[in-house]
Every structure is written in C-alpha cells, then in structure tokens.
Image (spheres, rainbow, N blue to C red):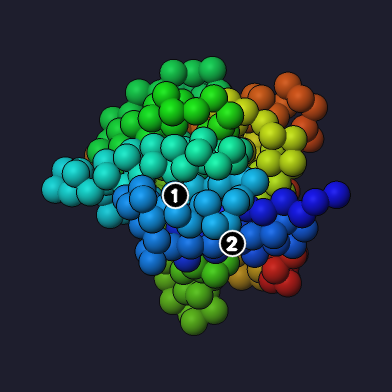
Amino acid sequence: MAETTVWITGAKGFLGAELVKRLSAEGFRVVGTDAELSVGEPERLEAFANELRPDVIVNCAGIPRAATGLGNRIKAYEVNALGARNMALVASTVGAYFVQISTDDVYPTRNREPLNEFDSPHPDTPYGKSKRAGEMMVKDTMPDHLIVRSSWLYHVQGGRMKAVLDAAKNGQTYKARTDQYAAPTSVALYARILAKAIQRRATGVLHITSTGEASRYDLAAKALSLCGYEPGKVLIPETDLVTAERVILESLMLEMFGADLPTWEEDLESYLAEEGLLA
C-alpha cells in the first residue's frame, strides 16, 4: 500500500508540531511548513504542492486567540480566513483531502448546554469570527474537506499545563479560573482520532473532545494530584465575571459512529502516564 503524504501547515505551532510528531508515529509521511511558506502566498503554496503532491493537507496555520483583537482584525482574517481559503484551493488543485483545524471559539463564549456538530456557530469574539470565516471559505471552496473543532487542547511541553506543573515543581503558586468551563482534551487523544479520520477520509464537521466538563481550576487540580502534588498548596482560585466562559463541545458524530470516548479525567491520566509524569 502506497505511503500517505501529509502536508501540515503551521508546523512549528503547538498543535502543528504535535501533529507532525504523532501522525509520523501513526505511519504517515509528514512534511511540515511554517512561516517560511505563508498561507497568504497562494502562488508559492501551489508551487510547493505541485512539487510535493500531498495526499492530505492539514491546515494548522493561524493567528491564535491570544494574539487576536479589534486592533489586528485584518491580519487575523488574512490568515485565519483567507489563508484557509488559499490552502483549500491548493488542496483542490492537487486533488488532496483537506483538513481545516478550527476551534470552539466559533460558538458564543457562554452556553447553557453542550454544543454538537449540528449546532450553528455564532462567534462573539474577533478570533472566533475570523475562524468561522475560514470554515465558511473552506466549505465554499471544495467539497472534500473536514473541519475539526476542539477545546482546551493541552500538552506538557507548553501552555497552561506546563505552567501549572512548573509552578508546583518550583514551589510557586498558580492562579486558575473557577468560572471558565470546557471539555479539556489531550493532544494524544486528538491526534489519534484525527489520524483515524484521515485514514477514513471523513468529511463535514467533527468535534474531537473528551467527555464531561471541567473548569480550568478542576483541570489543574486533577493534573497536580495525578503528578503527586497537593493542589491546595499550588492553586489560587480566580474569577472574573467579565471573562467567565462556558463552551462545552460534544463529539456527537464520533459517538454516533460508536467511538468510545474517555472522560476528561481518564484522558488526562492516560496522557500523563504516556508522558511518564504520574506519581
């Protein structure tokens, strides 16, 4: 059977780097590009694609939420929306299956009930609006695509998970929100499911998350406990009515196809065990 070539953009970002490593381990031939080949340069993208002839393109490139505000909306739309369209056009040109990495930010930041793939997005942040525009441009550009959303993806090489474990290791404290809720998901679970979706050429919209919900405090406390630390000595509860959030993604499509999804606690324990960090 011929080797499947996967081109990942944004390959030096947190998720892109993890997917390069983990999809390679799944047996794919993976080629990653980053800032040296901008998603805003359609002619160079097409030339690269014609040389590489990828079977699959996974677009991880994007301006992140923390760097997106009213002051740089134009840049966010250039990358998150027009960049997504450019990559979809390239995929269509070379006949590649296309995966657009999206986010739970395409939904409002405060929701009473879990949100599945059939719930209509209505973003209320500049970042969410730019990512939703990217989803729509992909849908309008080519039929053979998959849009993947998740929430609170974590790994121990960076981000909040590394920060809280470093604080514990160094005898410091860490502020954790008790009023922001989501379905935390490890990069390990995310990559495993994405690999299967790519192998099966799934199309449409897919939510990849663990089950259940947790606050940022809950997630940090569970991680600390599993790693042998006392959460009460590390964590400082924090709230802010202005930035309180509740966006719980539900992986309804995966459940409909019989996937056995772990709870967020099971996912966290499995991931920390894989990383050799359990107490």
Q: Which mark is residue 191?
A: none
- Which image quadrant for residue 270? bottom right
Q: Residue at x 57, y 67 (%)?
A: 156
Q: Residue at x 19, y 44 (%)?
A: 74
Q: Residue at x 47, y 42 (%)?
A: 90
**Residue placed most toward the observer, 150 or 170:** 150
Q: Kindly tell me whether residue 205 is visible in this rendering.
A: yes
Q: Which residue lies furthest to the right in this view?
A: 1
- Which image quadrant for residue 237? bottom left
Amino acid type of the residue that numbered disc 1 sits on in the rendered structure: Glu
Image coords of residue 136 (percent x, y)? 39, 27
Image coords of residue 110 (percent x, y)? 37, 29
Residue tagged 1? 46
Looking at the image, do the residues carrying marks 1 and 2 touch, with CB atoms under 8 Å apart? no
- Which image quadrant for residue 95? top right
Tally of marks: 2
What is the C-alpha distance between the residues marked 1 and 2? 15 Å
Amino acid type of the residue that numbered disc 2 sits on in the rendered structure: Val
Label 2 Cα crowd, 10 Å radius (few <14 / some 14-19 / many 20+): some
